[in-house]
Amino acid sequence: DAGVIQSPRHEVTEMGQEVTLRCKPISGHDYLFWYRQTMMRGLELLIYFNNNVPIDDSGMPEDRFSAKMPNASFSTLKIQPSEPRDSAVYFCASSRSTGNTIYFGEGSWLTVV
Amino acid sequence: GDSVTQMEGPVTLSEEAFLTINCTYTATGYPSLFWYVQYPGEGLQLLLKATKADDKGSNKGFEATYRKETTSFHLEKGSVQVSDSAVYFCARDGGSQGNLIFGKGTKLSVKP
């Protein structure tokens, strides 16, 4: 089975530009998570969805960040406008249900210059 | 609030040394517990898990036992290899919230 698929794997963009990260969860998984990882702050949960509905977005840093899940097989995380401090690895992950293993994608490595 | 605390790294060991990475958790009830591993440049992968008290999770020579008395889930390996160099994350499930609560991660470096 295919795992969680993220794109792009690497992106370098200029400050002020819009960034869109994409994720395809594992088929049949009801939960989808967006995490951010940096050296300074470690692994942070930004937002997660259950059955395409956002459940907890308290980790979203500010209004520049938004996430959508229009259907069960696709989600986006958008940063507009991007800033250098947004440079990080963004992971998408999915799981079948509460308490089950969460499966991570390989991450999108974002650099904002 | 509910949390996961794991020993701070980095941990540096010689090949074939014994490894312990401590992890404790706080929770109401008995959450499922997990260890994830992140190799350089990759995402997190499940290493092992335990779903109830006294369960032992094991994989690739790593073991961890769910200890409800001490609310701990320490990771151990009897003989580490250079290829075990990675960051290890302890986690517990978030209950009805559906997410996982992660510790801050412990970086392990194994020298030949």
Image (cartoon, coloured by chain):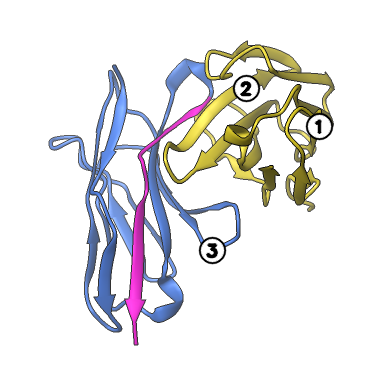
Chain colours: A yellow, B blue
Q: Residues within 10 Å of mark 3 (few under 14, many from 20)?
A: few
Tell which subunit mark 2 falls on. A
Decide: is B11 above or below B69.
below
Q: Which is the main secondary structure of the residues drawn in magenta?
A: strand
Asked which quadrant contains residue A35, the reply is top right
Closest to the observer, B34 or A46: A46
Q: What SS does tag 1 mark?
A: strand
Q: Is residue B102 magenta?
A: yes
Q: Which residue is mark 3?
A: B40
Number of labelled discs?
Answer: 3
> Which amino acid is tagged 1?
Thr
Decide which of tag 1 and tag 2 comes sooner along the chain: 1
Q: CA distance from mark 1 to mark 2?
A: 17 Å
Residue at 78% of width from left, 37% of height from top?
A23
Decide: is B92 above or below B45.
above
Tell which subunit mark 1 falls on. A
Q: What SS does tag 2 mark?
A: strand
Q: Residue B38's spot in the image, x, y percent?
A: 50, 56
Q: Residue A81's spot in the image, x, y percent?
A: 74, 23
Q: Is residue B3 left or right of residue A48?
A: left
Same chain check for tags 1 and 3: no
The answer to whether residue B78 shows anywhere in this view is no
Q: Which image quarter holds the C terminus of chain B? A: bottom left
Q: Is residue A99 left or right of residue A104?
A: left
Q: CA distance from mark 2 to mark 3?
A: 25 Å
Residue at 66% of width from left, 11% of height from top?
A63
Residue range (magenta): B99-112
Q: What SS does tag 3 mark?
A: loop
Q: CA distance from mark 1 to mark 3?
A: 24 Å
